[in-house]
Image (cartoon, rainbow, N blue to C red):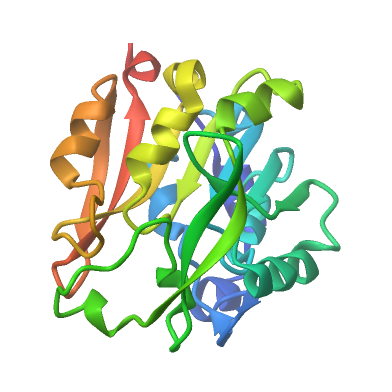
Amino acid sequence: MIDNSTFIINAFSDEELEHGAFIDLNGKCPLWTKTLINTIKDKIDFNEIKTILDIGSRDGCQSLELNRWFPHAKIYAFEPVNENYKFTVDNVSSIENIKALPYAINSYNGKTKFYEVYNGNVGASSLLQTTNHWRSSDWAQKETEVECIVLADWLTENKIDSVDLIWMDVQGAENIVLDSLKEYLHNVKIIATEVGLQELYHGSTSKQSLDEKLNQFIVLDETAESTMTEMDIVYINKNLLK
């Protein structure tokens, strides 16, 4: 029987669980990783989570949360928007096992166009341009250029043999990220991601295409947002359930 109670009890105080523990771009933020932890706590020994990728980190808060749940793990926080990256660096600077990285994930290494939202919801910035959908058309984008990497190449160069958990919020570019993992994807244990239910970005990943790409995974939890335009999903590798 899997028992992760020690990890869970020691992670946060009751006050932090209710009101949040860290500061994001707008002030104190709620704990967004609680659903993930409640979903996987009986499915995998937390000691097995040793390498975590936080892709689209925005402000580093979820990296800080994941560090509390998995204090033994190495966490890599990827955030290409320059001001967000600087905030993330400051936010995680006191935690030795979190490393912030200023990269977008793409199908090639180099530089890429990136569409930064500048009218409030910077977390909606993306590799992709918004459509005229009623929700995303309000996100004013400016085209910038950022550094991008192929995850598989970066992992190999940094002598990282495997990835155990991925926390991902990449605004429609989910399939780009997963393809970038190449052979590393097969051994990922847990993936927690947001995905669009409607096309908010041109060429964005759909729920159906994401499920098809992750056919070696099983959905443990899926929760649609109140607008019914996006969904949070937790996947687990089928190999862990054998």
- Left of 112 or right of it: where is 94? right
Q: Is residue 79 visible?
A: no
Nearest the eye: 74 or 145: 145
Residue at the location (26% across, 61% down)? 201
**Which residue is located at x 14 percent, y 80 percent?**
134
Above or below: residue 92 compared with residue 9: below
80 or 166, nearer to the observer? 80
- Please say if 219 is above or below 147: above
- Residue 144's image quarter? bottom right
- Image position, residue 176 (x, y; %): 39, 39
Between residues 191 and 185, which one lies in front from this camera angle? 185
Residue 10 % position (x, y)? 67, 55
Judge whether residue 154 can be spotted in this image: yes
Q: Position of residue 129 (x, y in %)?
A: 32, 64
Q: Quadrant of the N terminus?
A: top left
Q: Position of residue 111 (x, y in %)?
A: 60, 48
Q: Is residue 241 above or below residue 31?
A: above
Q: Give the side of residue 197 with respect to residue 121, left or right.
A: left
In the figure, residue 125 lies in which quadrant? Answer: bottom left
Q: For the C terminus, give its image quadrant.
A: top left
Q: How many numbered marks does the figure carry?
A: 0
Residue ID at (23%, 79%): 137
